[in-house]
Amino acid sequence: MIVIAQAGPRDIPDWARMRHALWCEASVAEHGEEICALIDRPDAGFLALIARTPDGAAVGFAEAAIRHEYVNGCDSSPVGFLEGIFVEDACRRAGLATRLCRAVEDWVRRMGCAELASDTDWENPEGIAFHAGFGFEETERVIFFRKHLI
């Protein structure tokens, strides 16, 4: 049985590796540094969960935060936000992502939030399907622009 627990300092190497698999723009080392900063946050507005097999192998994670600023498509504040979720290929389609999300939902409710939000890239059909399958409803699509001035 895969066990889901709150992530801590001993989880940093596995957590950083899986973060890199999800968000490959940053290196594993950069993810490790960001994780250290997240763990050191004094507030209670961040949750990280790690899923491990009985032999201790890390096979998934979820991160969530409480956002107090406006969250697109939401009617309340603060809002729980599923920042990221990842399950290793070999463990997909077995309900692990659902278990991670349920744990996030429970935490968000305990934090007093009425809504859970998330996002994914509009070109990520697997991410869109996951969110829809878990009961998220699409609220809007946005394209961001920039213009270099210097």
Image (cartoon, helix red, strand yellow):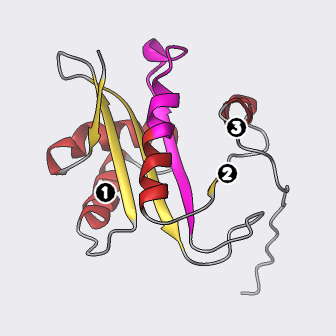
Q: Which residue is mark 1?
A: 35
Q: Is residue 150 above or below residue 96?
A: below
Q: Is the Cβ of the residue at disc 1 closer than 8 Å to that at disc 2?
A: no
The x and y percentages for residue 73 are 78, 63
Name which of mark 2 and mark 3 comes first in the sequence.
2
The x and y percentages for residue 106 are 45, 48
- SS for dot 1: helix
> For the residue marked with disc 2, what is the amino acid?
Asp
92 magenta-colored: yes
The x and y percentages for residue 83 are 52, 53
**CA–CA distance in space, label 2 to label 3:** 13 Å
> For the residue marked with disc 1, what is the amino acid?
Ile
- SS for dot 3: loop
**CA–CA distance in space, label 3 to label 1:** 28 Å
Name which of mark 1 and mark 2 comes first in the sequence.
1
Badge nearest the viewer, 1 or 2: 2
Question: Which corner quadrant of the image does residue 3 belong to?
Answer: top left
Is 39 or 134 nearer to us in this picture?
134
The x and y percentages for residue 76 are 67, 71
Q: Which residue is mark 3?
A: 135
Q: Is residue 141 above or below residue 55?
A: below
> Going by the image, does 98 lie left or right of 63?
right
> For the residue marked with disc 3, what is the amino acid?
Gly
Badge nearest the viewer, 2 or 3: 3
Question: Which corner quadrant of the image does residue 111 belong to?
Answer: bottom left
Residue lying at 50% horizontally and 47% vertically, measured from the top left: 105
Q: Is residue 57 above or below residue 40?
A: above
Residue lying at 31% horizontally and 41% vertically, measured from the top left: 15
Q: Which residues are magenta?
A: 79-102
> Going by the image, does 115 lie left or right of 55?
right
Q: Which residue is mark 2?
A: 119
Q: Residues within 10 Å of mark 1 (few under 14, many from 20)?
A: many
